[in-house]
Image: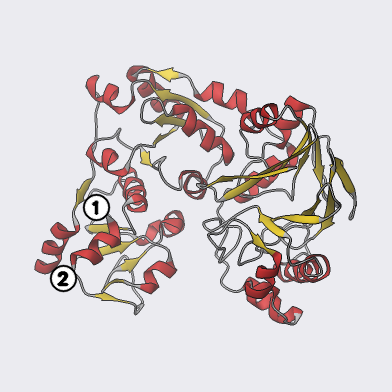
Amino acid sequence: MKVEQIYTGCLAQGAYYISSEGEAAIIDPLREVEPYIRRAEKDNSTIKYVFETHFHADFVSGHVDLAQKTGATIVYGPTARPGFQAHIATDGELFSIGKIKIKVLHTPGHTLESSCYLLTDENGKETALFTGDTLFIGDVGRPDLAQKVSADLTQDKLAGMLYDSLRDKILPLADDLTVYPAHGAGSACGKNMSRETSDSLGHQKATNYALRPMSKEQFIQEVTDGLLPPPAYFPENVMMNIKGYESIDTVLKRGSTPLSPEVFETAANETGALILDTRKPQDFAKGFIPNSINIGIDGGFAPWVGALITNIRQEILLVSDQGREEEVLTRLARVGYDNTIGYLEGGFEAWKAAGKETDTITSISAAEFGEIHRQDPGVSILDVRKPGEFQSEHVENAENLPLDYINERFSELNKDRPYYIHCAGGYRSMIFASILKARGFENITDIRGGFSAIRDSGAFKLTDYVCPTTLNS
């Protein structure tokens, strides 16, 4: 028997490969399925099942493509109603993979169809539990994502279901089971997930706040407290996972069209496509195509695309480092952004060599900003980190406008007011600055290295006191 976790850090997502005696199963695969097919071929195994723990919101699963390419059966838990051929399991149903078995445990709460998969080895011993978004390491799944399924379904009702699922189905299981969740720290599917990607169930019983003895009412209050609004693309990904989607092969072929600077410029003018530049933040700052947005591929790329590009069907023109086009297209497809219509052949250097118009964003060091701040302590500082980061420590008199909320709070900013923008390390601030620049803001300056560099410079008074601010005052 083999059990392998295939973890993708940029999505904080865990898929699983399980094999025995020439048969294999995949749990919660990503959109690109060739790695799973190659893994099974390496073992001379046939992929028999694709198990889905639920209809995912934060990524588009590869279940449809994987089933079509391998003949595997897609399996969902009770109550699932997919728009494609799948086996809807009953609670407690057993599936054989070689000499091992997987048992379905219906655990509604995160979603109505959410299910965990209990693995029994060749000797009949229960060894692992694949918990999807029902149980994380240090947390449980948020209960607010499925509340629009029916008019009378609320996050409190879902949280109550989750309480029962955890106590009736999971807590009675043996302490020595290994818990394999669908996500770790960084995912928006929970609140306080650990950076660990697996653990013993016994340790989770002892340390996970949601598993300690408490009333259902207390559980509901704790699990629903402090939930931030989910990213806008979540419902779109859910529908793609329920209804099916275009093959990733088709998506990659369409997006892999090389465009000369002239054709790229014509396409940008005629289609209304968004120009997405995925180079490193500081490379972008030194020169970019006017009105393009920077979301660097070397960071939390896919979740930020999903959070900030509000229309999942938006046509996209791509500017990337040469040779990384397919990587970018794949990571866009993971979150359902399938409408890339081509990329700039030769990258930004080709655009510049063709004599096309370019733009820049001023980016200064923390030391340079320290001198500016010393001469004028009243300069406007925009801290675009998350509220918790800001509350922990920030530059005195800085204003907090998290990148997550730029589309909702954009109107609070004043184009006539100069802004100095920083995040934690420089990735988010350049995204923020590029969006402002594309919307006509000229008086913006990025602080290179972010809050880490600001703190290390020693030139600023820092505070953890959060004062109310009005951004357009």
Pick the front one: 41 or 442: 41
Res 232 visible: yes
**Which percent across, then down, holds residue 178?**
70, 58
Residue 179 — which label?
none
**Which percent across, then down, holds residue 321?**
36, 30
Q: Is residue 111 above or below residue 273?
A: below
The residue identified by callout 1 is 448
Furthest residue in direction left, as rendered: 375
> Which part of the image, by quadrant, shows the C terminus?
bottom left
Res 351 → quadrant: top left
Q: CA distance from mark 2 to mark 1?
A: 19 Å
**Which percent across, then down, holds residue 289?**
30, 32
Q: Nearer the viewer, mark 2 or mark 1?
A: 1
Res 114 visible: no
Look at the numbered discs 2 and 1 and tell me whether their residues touch, using CB distance below 8 Å.
no
Residue pictured at 33% horizontal, 53% vertical: 429
Q: Amino acid at mark 1?
A: Arg
67 displayed left or right of 426: right
Pick the front one: 411 or 262: 262
Q: Is residue 323 above or below residue 181?
A: above
Furthest residue in direction front, as rendered: 123
218 displayed left or right of 318: right
Q: Is residue 436 above or below residue 256?
A: below
The residue identified by callout 2 is 377
Helix, strand or loop under label 2: loop
**Which percent across, then down, holds residue 47?**
76, 32
Q: Amino acid at mark 2?
A: Pro
Residue pictured at 30% horizontal, 35% vertical: 290
